[in-house]
Image (tube, rainbow, N blue to C red):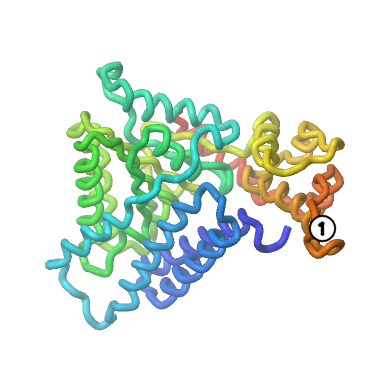
């Protein structure tokens, strides 16, 4: 595949965003701005190259938040540390910007397999929202999705908002951190206050935190504000269980590095769901899902192809199908300049792509996920 494959770009954008947050934490604002801008550029490229991508709504939201953080940092004068007073209206605007205005265009039907994760989400969020009277002891409010990148964690969270017709709030380290001293914990409090306000009007609310380890993980170079922010988040999570039982507010967090979370946070997520590499049956379902819109030659056996894709992520499989189809399109342009129809994709096309495409996750890393899952699983 070329360097413009979707999973490659998505992983690049996440890498830049995480690096931006790390530099932001360290006070290296110049480097943080550089990485935020790189993330913005890659996300913009994804939206341009893949206009039908189901996550583009979320990516547009990320771009907006990163641009806001860049503007904050570029306006910050290093020699002046302003007090936190007088910034409440700006903070309120920040919370409004976290709300995804257009719901993501993805449902459970668009996600192949992951039935164990869907079942846990149904039991924890969808059933209680529809029939709270059936849950006299309450229900889980915190769900942690963890596993290798590219296996569907963000898609799952986005689909939930559609399944319950709820408000989707995307929060991450970039949107929570502030140039104003002591404002991060206030922003967390306002985030949950806004969620309660929306929920009191009858709307279920999903607070989605992607790359949660970059926000709530522990780091050796922490400052007091980060500790206070994490403590505020713990209090708000406890409040969802104890004080606001009638509110339909849920926190879904996703991470590729669950071991960076301390146990205080792990306990607040009553459901901890491993989103693994797709197994054989899941790979067949993914192949069916992603080949629906392309023409396949009669020699393409999806079961045989699925057996060749052991160890590949869902994103890898999507890119491999895209790459095989691209071969036929390129051939058409080379022969006719783009006139006529591309030939069907053959099994040989898939094999040619696989020769240059290896799995994006190594086997040793999978062992680490399984070890953590054995210790902390709660499905």
Q: Is residue 12 visible?
A: yes
Horizontal and vertical percent for residue 244?
20, 34
Q: Residue at 79% of width from left, 59% of height from top?
A: 339
Nearer-the-camera pick, 145 or 229: 145
| Left/right of residue 140 with respect to residue 324 in the rendered view | left
Q: Nearer the viewer, residue 110 or 255?
A: 110
Residue at x-position 50% and y-position 70%: 38
Residue drawn at point x = 80 percent, y = 62 percent: 333
In the shown orientation, is residue 202 left or right of residue 293?
left
The residue lying furthest to the left in this view is: 85
Q: Quadrant of the C terminus?
A: top left
Residue 15 visible in the displayed image? no
Judged from this view, the residue extending furthest toward the bottom is: 79
Q: Position of residue 108 (x, y in %)?
A: 51, 33
Q: Residue at x 26, y 55 (%)?
A: 95
Quadrant where the N terminus lies? bottom right
Q: Position of residue 37 (x, y in %)?
A: 46, 71
With respect to residue 103, does 86 lie above or below? Answer: below
Number of other residues with Cα within 10 Å of mark 1, as a class: few under 14, some 14 to 19, many 20 or more: some
Q: Indicate the quadrant where residue 152 lies.
A: top right
Q: Which residue is mark 1?
A: 332
- Front in this rendered view, residue 124 or 129: 129
Secondary structure under badge 1?
Answer: helix
- Residue 189 vs 136, above or below: the answer is below
């Amino acid at each position: 595949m070329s360097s413009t494959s979707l999973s490659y770009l998505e992983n690049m954008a996440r890498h830049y965003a995480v690096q931006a947050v790390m530099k932001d934490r360290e006070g290296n604002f110049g480097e943080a701005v550089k990485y935020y801008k790189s993330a913005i550029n890659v996300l913009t490229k994804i939206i341009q190259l893949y206009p039908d991508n189901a996550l583009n709504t979320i990516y547009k939201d990320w771009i907006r938040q990163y641009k806001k953080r860049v503007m904050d940092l570029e306006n910050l004068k290093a020699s002046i540390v302003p007090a936190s007073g007088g910034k409440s209206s700006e903070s309120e605007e920040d919370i409004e910007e976290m709300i995804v205005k257009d719901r993501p265009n993805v449902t459970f039907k668009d996600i192949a397999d992951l039935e164990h994760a869907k079942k846990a989400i149904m039991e924890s969020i969808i059933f209680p929202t529809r029939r709270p009277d059936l849950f006299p002891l309450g229900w889980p409010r915190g769900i942690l999705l963890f596993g290798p990148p590219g296996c569907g964690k963000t898609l799952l969270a986005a689909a939930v908002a559609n399944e319950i017709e709820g408000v989707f709030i995307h929060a991450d380290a970039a949107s929570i951190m502030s140039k104003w001293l002591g404002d991060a914990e206030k922003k967390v409090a306002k985030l949950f206050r806004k969620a309660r306000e929306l929920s009191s009007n009858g709307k279920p609310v999903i607070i989605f935190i992607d790359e949660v380890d970059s926000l709530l993980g522990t780091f050796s170079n922490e400052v007091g504000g980060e500790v206070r922010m994490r403590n505020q988040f713990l209090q708000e999570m406890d409040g969802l269980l104890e004080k606001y039982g009638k509110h339909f507010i849920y926190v879904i967090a996703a991470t590729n590095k669950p071991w960076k979370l301390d146990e205080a946070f792990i306990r607040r997520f009553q459901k901890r769901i491993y989103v693994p590499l797709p197994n054989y049956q899941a790979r067949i379902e993914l192949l069916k899902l992603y080949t629906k819109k392309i023409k396949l030659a009669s020699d393409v056996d999806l079961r045989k192809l699925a057996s060749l894709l052991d160890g590949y992520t869902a994103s890898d499989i999507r890119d491999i199908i895209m790459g095989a189809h691209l071969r036929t399109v390129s051939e058409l342009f080379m022969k006719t300049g783009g006139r006529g129809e591309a030939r069907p994709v053959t099994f040989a096309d898939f094999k040619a792509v696989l020769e240059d495409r290896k799995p994006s996750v190594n086997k040793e890393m999978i062992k680490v996920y399984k070890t953590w899952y054995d210790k902390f699983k709660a499905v």
